[in-house]
Image (tube, coloured by chain):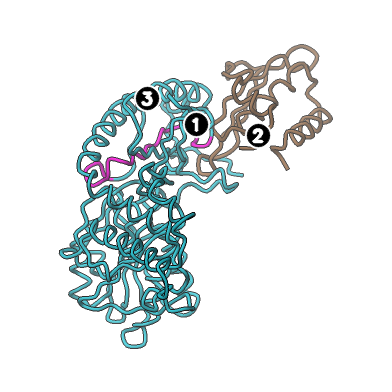
Chain colours: A brown, B cyan
Amino acid sequence: MAYSDKVLDHYENPRNVGSLDKNDPNVGTGMVGAPACGDVMKLQIKLGKNGLIEDAKFKTYGCGSAIASSSLVTEMLKGKLLMKQNQLKILLSLKSLRYLL
Amino acid sequence: MKLPIYMDYSATTPVDKRVAEKMIPFITEEFGNPASRSHPYGWTAEKAVEEARRHVADLVNADPKEIVWTSGATESNNLAIKGIAEFYSKDKGKHIITVATEHKAVIDAFRELERIGYEATYLTPEPNGLINIEKFKAAIRPDTVLASVMFVNNEIGVIQDIHSLGNICREHNVIFHVDAAQATGKVDIDLTKLPVDVMSFSAHKTYGPKGIGALYVRRKPRIRLQAQMHGGGHERGMRSGTLATHQIVGMGEAFKIAKEEMHDENKRIKKLHDQLLKGLTEIEEVYVNGDLNHRVPHNLNISFNYVEGESLIMAIKDIAVSSGSACTSASLEPSYVLRALGRSDELAHSSIRFSIGRYTTEEDINHAIDLLKQKIGKLRELSPLWEMFKDGVDLEKVEWAAH
């Protein structure tokens, strides 16, 4: 398997695994994927003061790279402003991880 | 213990050391061409080839004259299916029957025949992987020329009722081909009793070398086939090409050992299989794929629900196994075999094939069980599907955002 060290690290030691309280008004929950496609990702963020993402958690069913990229994205989200520009930056970083094309 | 522990014997087996020793002189010293009739180099090679042919025939109780050397089971399957269809279709018709869970060497040979004008029926097996005899009978038409069914399935290890299927073929004058690549040394095969017309064999699934196989072609009643490889007319015109003496000697020795030892070996492997099955089914939400009674003990195909197969294989890199899902080949399609059994997408994506053999030990099995228990727990902690299952959500009713 030709996974990069970074993917392997995030797969073996995933960051921010878990769940946030979905009833908290400051928590946003999203889920994409389908078991039929072989991956499902649940991502949650918690907004703090001034629009900053205070916390992010994930759970992913999928192959090694799906788990690793979910872990990485949670790291990137934390402390960021909830803005379009940041979303783009995150997408570009994931591209560098060679998960998204 | 040597890591990773090899548990992928259905993919290939190591060459038994006794087999390798027997092969070596035929690479260096006894290098003659078995077709050379004019000197002792050729005679010695020919004698070795014929002795090996006898060993292969002995394992399946056939006449050595009924054994044709090929490069492996893929070639044997191609030669049997295309060769028979071509030879008999003029008189009988162009309908052919197989099963959706066959090996790709059979499925793709059928697809090729379809491309040139044949009509094919791909039977769906029952959820346990076995063929329903009545459905098989119903698929036969007056213009059916050939049926092809594998003896032991490579992914799920189930044993088909070849005897009953063969009898039906006899009644309807349909030629019956059986791919026995995964069966030799695992189940008793007696071709004097089995109503089978042609049967494919492979050496490397039975502790012989890769690149050599054989095709059994019945003489009474005589089965004819159109050669697919043309040349010097070797193997009574059915398969031209210089015989690979050392490979043939290896296959012969491997099959000889199989005949002598299979009885004791299979008893030992059954014990290991039961130990593995018991250990793994202690884990919550696991499902065995394929019938539990009609199977070879060498195979255990199991789905670990709510865990994806490729990530599981990454997690258990101490053991060399394969996933039902073809994730590694860049397609995320789940196993076509498990889909044909009607397994749900989650279960098809979550399957692992453990296949054990001659060198698997009790210690290996215990190590595998411990590792699986630990890693399944970890991956389920990561799985949103597991969380939903634990919260009582019915996953069948969720509207997924497929991508």
Residue B190 x/y as whole percent: 19, 59
Are dots 2 and 1 in contact, CB under 8 Å? Answer: no
Q: Position of residue B301 (x, y in %)?
A: 36, 40
Q: Residue at x 40, y 48 (%)?
A: B338
Write down the residue under mark 2: A3
Q: Chain of mark 3?
A: B
Distance from disc 2 to disc 3, alpha carbons, whole Å, reads 26 Å
Q: Is residue B367 left or right of residue B325?
A: left
Q: Inspect the magenta stretch and tell me whether residue B295 lies in it.
A: yes
Query: Is A63 drawn above or below residue B186 in the view shown?
Result: above
Marking on residue A38? none
Element marked by disc 2: loop
Q: Is the same chain shared between marks 2 and 1?
A: no
> In this figure, which residue is indicated by the disc labeled 1?
B312
Write the start and end of the magenta stretch as one range. B291-310
Measure the C-alpha gap from mark 3 to mark 1.
13 Å
The amino acid on which the numbered mark 1 sits, given as a three-letter code, is Leu
Given the image, on which type of amino acid does mark 2 rest? Tyr
